[in-house]
Image (cartoon, grey):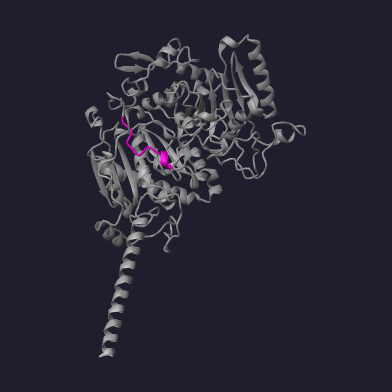
Amino acid sequence: MKQKNEQIHTTKLLTYVLIGLIAVLGLLCLYYGSSFAPGSRRSDETGSRLDGSDPVFGGVSRNRDLVDLLDERGYYPEVPKSIPICDIKYSELIPCLDRNLIYQLKLKPNLTVMEHYERHCPPPERRYNCLIPPPRGYKIPIRWPASRDEVWKANIPHTHLAKEKSDQHWMVVDGEKIKFPGGGTHFHDGADKYITGLAQMLKFPGDKLHNGGSIRNVLDVGCGVASFGAYLLPLDIIAMSLAPNDVHENQIQFALERGIPSTLGVLGTKRLPYPSRSFELAHCSRCRIDWLQRDGILLLELDRLLRPGGYFAYSSPEAYEQDPENRKIWNAMYNLLKRMCWKVAVKRGQTVIWAKPLSNSCYLKRDPGTRPPLCSSGDDPDASWNVSMKACITPYSAKMHKERWSGLLPWPQRLTTAPPRLEEIGVSPEEFHEDTKIWHFRVVEYWKQMRSIIQKNSFRNVLDMNSNLGGFAAALKDKDVWVMNVAPVKMSARLKIIYDRGLLGTVHDWCEAFSTYPRTYDLLHAWAVFSEIEERGCSAEDLLIEMDRILRPDGFVIIRDKHSMINHIQKFITALRWDGWLSEVEPRTDALSAGEERVLIARKKLWSDGFMTM
């Protein structure tokens, strides 16, 4: 009897142990199932990863059926039914260029070198996890090309620039609209005639600044409302119009509302987020930038960005022509640029155009100890994300193409021709052409997917969040749009190919907010972006909220990603108010496909004033 009782006891004990093990395993499954849910918010702590890395992205590979099963049973974090709307006072918030944040965090930027206009992103606990509302009375923007000359005043309710610059014809308030006559501080007869004047100074054929297509990419610093860039577009010249969020804080916002390529940025302490040898022409009209500060470091940044033989068009205010201090500055600039081996191409009145050298020969002839020095051989001139400017000259390496304009064909041939710098990133001409063909097909399929809802002029400002070699933008060449091509930081070496194709772009980390105003873009294209940030431990929800911030009402998002990621994103569509129109398809597999992909296209609704106050 005793033996039988012992057997019963042993059997019960084993049963309890087995039940306990099953419970522990169940909890572990629940824990890991939620920890690796697509886009789940994670802490800054990094835990150990499971085996089974994705062969393309290096992330955790999950079985789709298991993902869907766990999702159906509610093992993933709960998706919010709604996302709160921020206070109306944040309608123009740029999280990483918010000067209030500098004061709140008690940062001490050096004001004399413009550090307060550079990026300072909020820590995770200070992020605005709410949707940015439009200003009251907001209207769908006027479509291009009419928008070049007029915008709705309600969309950018700031008229101080019109009053401050009334004598310079920047902009004029006319009822419900703000109009742009095409003037500027230095464009007394209009930007178009000013541009013709520059071409005449350089003796370009037909007085056309594009010079037969050899001048395509322009950097316009201190651009105002970007009228210079606007009037370059008919010449097939595209300008990166650059200005800080300074006392004229809405100038870039007006430029973007007009549909003109432009961005927020400053010549401060960090390199501009562009690769070396990206522009044929740099321009600064009525220029008040102190180019002589810190051993000429700002001019040396322009030197890094200009192609061999590139031009710098500089003008100072006519009123300063006889000013002794202005003459002193001019003489000092002339001496500095001479030591940099730049030559005066032409000078007329207060406008001068310098040209960058084509080779190292002048550098090698300088006296020993001449400043500025040459950069060390270890410096990467293409590194530009959060990299400090350097007061040195980047010499041409033996592999660099030192021909004028880096050996590129004129526009538009350069758009589809394999550029010489492909070799530097390990891509063959055959791979380049295959990429171009694939993206042409993909874009055709996107437009077929949207054809029932879009019109000819639905899009003007387009953002490609993972541009690779620029194939998406190249496929849009026959549409009246401009594309901001973004190279994620780990792919930043490819941005030089974007510029060599005659396109514009920037480097960015999508774990942070983008440097632009709310409601900038009509179309956002995100290919494998969510997979990439999830692999790095960043939040898909944060990125969706950021995408909503920079997307215009009535605008579209095209998200191409893994099936499981698309499933997760879909659950946020209603909370984001992106359910104005929705489509999801499984695209044809091609050489760029990362396993099984889905394409989700959604349209953002225009909120009513009543909805914002709910």
Residue 549 sits in which quadrant?
top left
Start-end of magenta stretch: 124-133
Rendering coords of residue 133 (x, y %): 31, 31
Q: Front-most of 184 and 232? A: 184
Q: Front-most of 186 and 39? A: 39
Task: Tell me the quadrant of the picture where the C terminus can be found.
Answer: top left
User: Does residue 73 show up?
Assistant: yes
Q: Residue furthest right?
A: 368
Rendering coords of residue 363 (x, y %): 71, 34
Taking 62 as reference, is 414 left or right? right
Residue at 67 percent of width and 16 percent of height: 328
Residue at 35 percent of width and 45 percent of height: 541
Magenta stretch secondary structure, dominant? loop
User: Does residue 202 show up?
Assistant: no
Q: Is residue 152 above or below residue 443?
A: above
Q: Front-most of 207 and 58? A: 58
Q: Front-most of 136 and 378? A: 136
Taking 240 as reference, is 371 left or right? right
Taking 296 as reference, is 599 left or right? left
Q: Is residue 177 above or below residue 569?
A: above
Q: Is residue 294 above or below residue 187?
A: below
Task: Tell me the quadrant of the picture where the N terminus can be found.
Answer: bottom left
Residue 232 sits in which quadrant?
top left
- Is 525 within the magenta? no
Rendering coords of residue 176 (x, y %): 29, 17
Say how many tags the image has: 0
